Amino acid sequence: PQVEPDVAPPHDVFAPIVFPMTDASWPTVNPATVGWDVAKLNVALDFAGSRDTRAIVILQDGKILAERYWTVNSNFMRDIASAQKSVVSVLIGIAVDKQLLSLDERVSTILGAGWSNTTALNEARITVRHLLTMTSGLNTSLGLQTTPGTTWLYNNDAYHRLRMILEQRSGLGIQALSDAWLFNPLGATRSEWVQRPETDSKGMPLWGLTMSARDLARFGLLLHANGMWAGTRIVSAAYLSTATQSSQTLNPAYGHLFWLNGKAFTLIPPLSARIDGPLIPSAPQDVFAGLGKDDQKVYVSRSLGLVVTRLGQQAGTRSAETLSDFDEELWARIMAARL
């Protein structure tokens, strides 16, 4: 008689989420007991290692499903590049929750006139939401390009104004407010803002966010849990819902500083080249992500209860500032490991 293959039941989307109190006490789970082919999962990890990965962490419902390091250990921290944008998005959400600012508030009312290099009239039209959604209408030197809200352009200099907005409205430096609002509540002890040597087009210093793969996974787990952490509300579900949905029709794969899978097309920086189809075809359609230069990654799939973080050197042969072929190839191997 034909033997039916062992097939794991689909992931229970109502499975309880485990929140690690400390790194030392972080629970693990045997992949074979929760619907994974261990050999194929190791293929995915080996692939990551072959692409200059230093650290990869995979969580299922908060438990460590897989974790591996190459030439470093779990204390390893590095600049997560533009994946920091998703962290700043959550900090903005917390500021909104605290009623320190509004997304539709004009940036000039917070930072004062002259924060950009465009005309006073145009500058006065730009809102916090425009900065969050890359629709400020400014060029990458903060000069006038188009009317706010009419074009999508991945704009780092415009984005960095959000850190200044947070500091202005909170009265705290970026490290102090990040610690108080986010890192300390999550138990993220290896997350540090570091001033970069570069300045922007207004001569302002740039800041990088260095994190460990586990701390970045804590952040992803907060997102998976819709803003809750061990029974405490960190950021409102309403803000996260907005942040992880299409923020405009110009680039439906972009929310509020989050990249979104499962959309009809994507505009890829730096030149806004259009790619038809989902951001990462092999990944679950509900994946949203923080993506940084040289393939710093945090991905979240609520449907599968997964959080995946990756730190390291450039992993893709077609690496843009954010997306690369590594995203597709890694997820193809992860999904092949699901029974």
Image (spheres, rainbow, N blue to C red):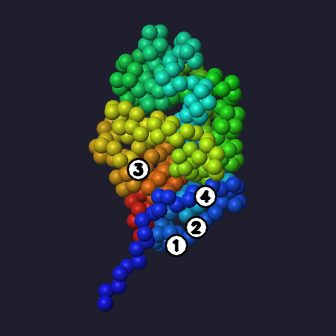
Q: Residue at x 47, y 53 (%)?
A: 302
Q: Residue at x 58, y 18 (%)?
A: 110
Q: Which quadrant would the N terminus be assigned to in this image? A: bottom left
**In the depicted view, which residue is nearer to us: 244 or 216?**
244
User: Can you say whether 118 is above or below 157 in the image?
Assistant: above
Q: Which residue is mark 2?
A: 29
- First of labels 2, 4 by sequence position: 4
Type of amino acid at the residue the image marks with label 2 = Val
Q: Which residue is mark 3?
A: 286
Q: Which residue is mark 4?
A: 18
Whether the residues at callouts 3 and 2 have beta carbons within 8 Å, the answer is: no
Q: Which quarter of the figure has residue 255? A: top left
Type of amino acid at the residue the image marks with label 3 = Asp
- Say what secondary structure mark 1 lies in: helix
The answer for how far apart the CA atoms under marks 3 and 4 are is 21 Å
- First of labels 4, 1 by sequence position: 4
Q: Which residue is mark 1?
A: 33
Q: Position of residue 209 (x, y in %)?
A: 61, 39
